[in-house]
Image (tube, grey):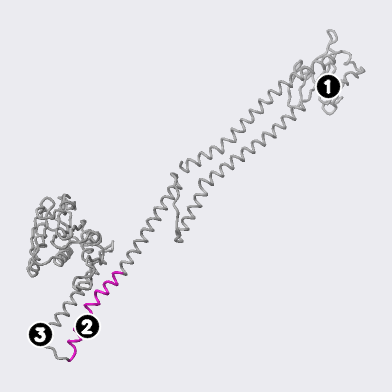
């Protein structure tokens, strides 16, 4: 139940229950009084008949009459007043209620005759007395209701006590409900927030479907996001530290070579012209290798930033990819590797030419490095409906998703040893190399090529995947979206 609904319901209960209880108690007391009135009325009526039989005697209304028998009727619950026919008091048993010098007016004297009048504290009865046809006086009887008043008073106090008790129970129930529904849960949530702020373990409890449950759910969702971000930052920090250590190690080897050959050139020892030229060539080669490593490191750092955007331009896909696949025949001939090239792209694409050249260079460098002399490399760029399926490895045809429409695929496939299945998921990780012998081939690079390739493809709105089987070969497939007729990427 929503807290708003629960609070409104609680307010309604707090308001309506006491009123309902008061009404029920009032009705109960009234019913009791009614039953008591009937019993009391019967008793008073019987007593009244006896009093009437005594007082309905003309002799009591003479001026100097002896009224000893009348006085015998007087009890704590009975009050009697005798009037003459003019309303002058002849006798009164309660001088505080009616003074002997008191007299009633004619209207008061003749109203409510022969009628038993019920009051809160007493019953009243008034009747004329005749001597033959002559009116001689009136008597007024008051029968007190002390027992009834006492019972009503007790019931009233009982009613007040029950009402207060019931109201207290309702109040305590609402307080307990508010504490259970609001205070305790909010306190627990604050404790969880404090524990999370201190880095302590936070135990998730059932959230509920009300506003506090939603708030708790948002807190736990935020907490999980923050914890994931912390883990990611920690992982990135470890990767940066590892990258710094790895790059430092990779830079140290060519730098030592440069220093050694530079010292040899600067020394006075006799060197032939061919040796000096060889040393200079080695220094230039090592310097270029260091430059390439630093360039890769800079590009990788830039691509890691979410704010770094690659500037893209719209180009004709056919012309651009014809150019992209046309510069590697000489390198393959030098290594006696057979290169099979195909370009069949239609439509326009948005690319950064320099970065796509970097992607092609990275993939071809890896393929050349892992392809032995005398075997083949396939290099292709084709629209999704013109893929060269005939030369793709069978396992690539089974595993790769090549049915994405309105796309351009850039494919580099080479025969060779392939990549072990346990290493394949990590090839796009920074500094990861399937061959652990990093120091054996200094010219192989810093291990950032595939990571940079993936980042570049992502910045282009595309993706890259790698497929490999040991003793068969490896295939890298890059996908870029084509432009539609409105000039937007599909």
Q: Could you say which is closer to the camera, residue 114 or residue 134? A: 114
Res. 259 mark: 2
Q: Position of residue 172 (x, y in %)?
A: 59, 43
- For label 1, count other residues whose C-alpha is less than 10 Å away and answer few (under 14), some (14-19) or many (20+): many
Q: Secondary structure at mark 3?
A: helix
The answer to whether residue 488 of the structure is visible from this angle is: no
Res. 322 mark: none
Q: Secondary structure at mark 1?
A: strand
- Find the magenta span and give its range: 242-268
Q: Nearer the viewer, mark 1 or mark 3?
A: 3
**Residue, x 49% and y 41% (percent of image)?**
6
Q: Quadrant of residue 333?
A: bottom left
**Residue, x 45% and y 53% (percent of image)?**
203
User: Does 280 sit left or right of 165 as displayed?
Assistant: left
Res. 274 mark: 3
Vertical relation: 364 (above or below) 162: below
Q: Earlier in the sequence, mark 3 or mark 2?
A: 2
Q: Main secondary structure of the magenta part?
A: helix
Magenta residue check for 258: yes
Q: Secondary structure at mark 2?
A: helix
């Amino acid at each position: 139940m929503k807290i708003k609904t629960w609070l409104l319901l609680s307010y309604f209960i707090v308001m309506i229950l006491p009123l309902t209880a008061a009404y029920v108690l009032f009705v109960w007391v009234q019913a009791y009084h009614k039953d008591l009135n009937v019993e009391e009325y019967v008793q008073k009526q019987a007593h009244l008949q006896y009093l009437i039989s005594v007082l309905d005697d003309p002799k009591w209304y003479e001026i100097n009459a002896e009224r000893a028998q009348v006085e015998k009727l007087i009890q704590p619950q009975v009050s009697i007043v005798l009037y003459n026919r003019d309303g002058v008091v002849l006798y009164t048993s309660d001088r505080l209620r009616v003074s002997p010098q008191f007299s009633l007016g004619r209207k008061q004297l003749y109203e409510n005759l022969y009628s038993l009048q019920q009051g809160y504290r007493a019953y009243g009865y008034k009747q004329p007395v005749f001597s033959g046809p002559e009116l001689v006086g009136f008597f007024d009887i008051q029968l007190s209701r002390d027992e009834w008043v006492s019972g009503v008073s007790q019931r009233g106090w009982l009613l007040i006590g029950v009402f207060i008790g019931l109201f207290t129970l309702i109040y305590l129930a609402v307080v307990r409900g508010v504490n259970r529904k609001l205070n305790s849960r909010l306190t627990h949530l604050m404790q969880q927030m404090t524990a999370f702020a201190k880095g302590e373990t936070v135990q998730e409890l059932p959230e509920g479907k009300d506003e506090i449950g939603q708030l708790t759910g948002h807190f736990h969702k935020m907490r999980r996001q923050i914890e994931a971000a912390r883990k990611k930052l920690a992982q990135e920090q470890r990767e940066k530290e590892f990258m710094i250590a790895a790059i430092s190690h990779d830079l140290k080897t060519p730098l030592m070579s440069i220093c050694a050959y530079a010292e040899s050139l600067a020394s006075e020892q006799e060197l032939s012209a061919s040796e000096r030229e060889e040393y200079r060539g080695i220094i230039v080669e090592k310097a270029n290798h260091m430059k390439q490593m630093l360039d890769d490191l800079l590009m990788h750092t830039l691509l890691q930033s979410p704010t770094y955007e690659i500037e893209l331009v719209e180009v004709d896909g056919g012309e651009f990819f014809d150019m992209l696949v046309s510069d590697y025949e000489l390198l393959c001939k030098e290594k006696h590797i057979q290169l099979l090239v195909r370009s069949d792209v239609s439509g326009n694409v948005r690319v950064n030419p320099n970065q796509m050249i970097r992607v092609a260079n990275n993939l071809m460098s890896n393929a050349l490095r892992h392809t032995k002399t005398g075997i083949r490399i396939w290099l292709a760029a084709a629209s999704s409906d013109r893929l060269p399926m005939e030369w793709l490895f069978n396992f690539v045809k089974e595993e790769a998703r090549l049915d994405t429409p309105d796309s351009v695929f850039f494919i580099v496939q080479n025969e060779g040893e392939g990549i072990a299945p346990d290493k394949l998921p990590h090839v796009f990780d920074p500094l990861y190399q399937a061959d652990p012998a990093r120091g054996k081939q200094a010219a192989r690079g810093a291990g950032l090529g595939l990571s940079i390739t993936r980042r570049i493809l992502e910045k282009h709105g595309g993706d890259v995947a790698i497929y490999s089987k040991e003793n068969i070969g490896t295939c890298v497939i890059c996908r870029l979206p084509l432009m539609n007729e409105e000039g937007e990427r599909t």
